[in-house]
Image (spheres, grey):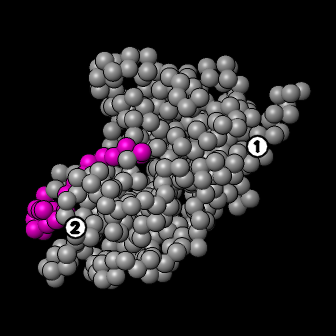
Amino acid sequence: MRILAITNLYPNPLQPQRASFNRAQLRALACQHGVEVIAPVAWTCRRGARRARSEGGSGALRRRISDGMVIHHPVFAYTPKILRGWYGVFFQQSVRACFHRVVREFRPDVVLGCWAYPDGWAAVRLAREVGLPVAIKAHGSDVLSAAEYPARCRRTIEALRGADAVLCVSRDLAAKAVAMGADRACVHTVYNGIESGLFHPGPKQPAREHLWIRSADPLIVFVGNLVPVKGIDVLLDALAVLAREGTKCQAAIVGEGSLRPKLQSRIETLGLTGRVWLAGGCPQDQLPHWYRAASLVVLPSRSEGLPNVLLEASACGTPWIASRVGGIPEIAPADAMFEPGDAPALAERIRSAMSFPDRPSAAPAFRPPSWEESARTLAAVLCRIASPNRANLAA
């Protein structure tokens, strides 16, 4: 089977750490099937093209080969922060020439749009132009937060209803997709995977030494993008409660994003300087050090699909606490959750965990699949919707 994936959530020469989960899943998929990827790069990021040219050549910004796949990087032209209802049209027009060229040369059996809008919306329309079946993979906030923008919500509903298959990373997200109008028979749950060779238990002290963490105090770690939906402000408020009580702990916020300046200011305002620090972004292959160094991983999100951070932490044997949102209840014991936005409740959960630092965490009933297992489940769905088309091509 030949699969053409379309998504802006994919590493590129200007953003090498972008959406590593999509890369991992498509790389596993490419071990059994032919895969090419159209991963447009926002024109706003192209301002860094001079740096990319000096590092990897200008051609790397258009087409490259990685993980045995051909990756195409057309420019995504759009109007930042305005006319969001038109982003699907902008996306479609930005990738159309590349899409038709790849279809002619690669002759895919099926199109996969990763992210419901604008990527999936555009993928549905482009696939229909050439008579190909199309699936959309929904990740979380692309569906869960759609209602915040009415125009975007309408387009997201159009995408979900127009696709031959909708792939969701949790049962909760699948139910939301059906509630928005997707055909129940076309909706499938495909859990994301983990790299089992990378994420596994290991000793704490060497991990701390690797990260230059000298304090012996319990370490709380957050991993994720520094954006409002991740609820990092709630974590800081909870840590401030613990600091006032004299609870010994330190915290590292691992990630980058638009909130970094505000978070730094909030850390200082709350008197957490020296106890909490912004550790910056982290390559995927370095994340296991943070999980192993941590006494506790905390994810206080206001909305989630099914976060890979928790799957990776579990694979490393690190206990975690997360807000009761999205698909998290599908993988979490009851004592590992708190209501989103409730800083005192989070403080209480952390306090309890810090009281028994050597107690094994409650084992979730959910065993995260490997990326190979996840890719096989995904491929089975794609094969079903591609089969009629493949028969027609053969004829």
Image mark for residue 216: 2
Q: Is residue 274 magenta?
A: yes
> Viewer-proximal residue, 8 or 371?
371
Q: CA distance from mark 2 to mark 1?
A: 52 Å
On-image quarter of the N terminus:
top right
Q: Secondary structure at mark 1?
A: helix
Q: Which residues are magenta?
A: 265-285
| Mark 2 or mark 1: whose residue is earlier in sequence | 2
- Whole-percent x, y for residue 153 in the image: 49, 54
* Residue 188 seen in the current view: yes
- The residue positioned 22% from the left and 70% from the top of the image is 217
Horizontal relation, residue 369 to residue 391: left or right: left
- The residue positioned 37% from the left and 47% from the top of the image is 286
Horizontal relation, residue 263 to residue 52: left or right: left
- Whole-percent x, y for residue 195 in the image: 53, 50
Horizontal relation, residue 253 to residue 154: left or right: left
- The residue positioned 74% from the left and 59% from the top of the image is 185
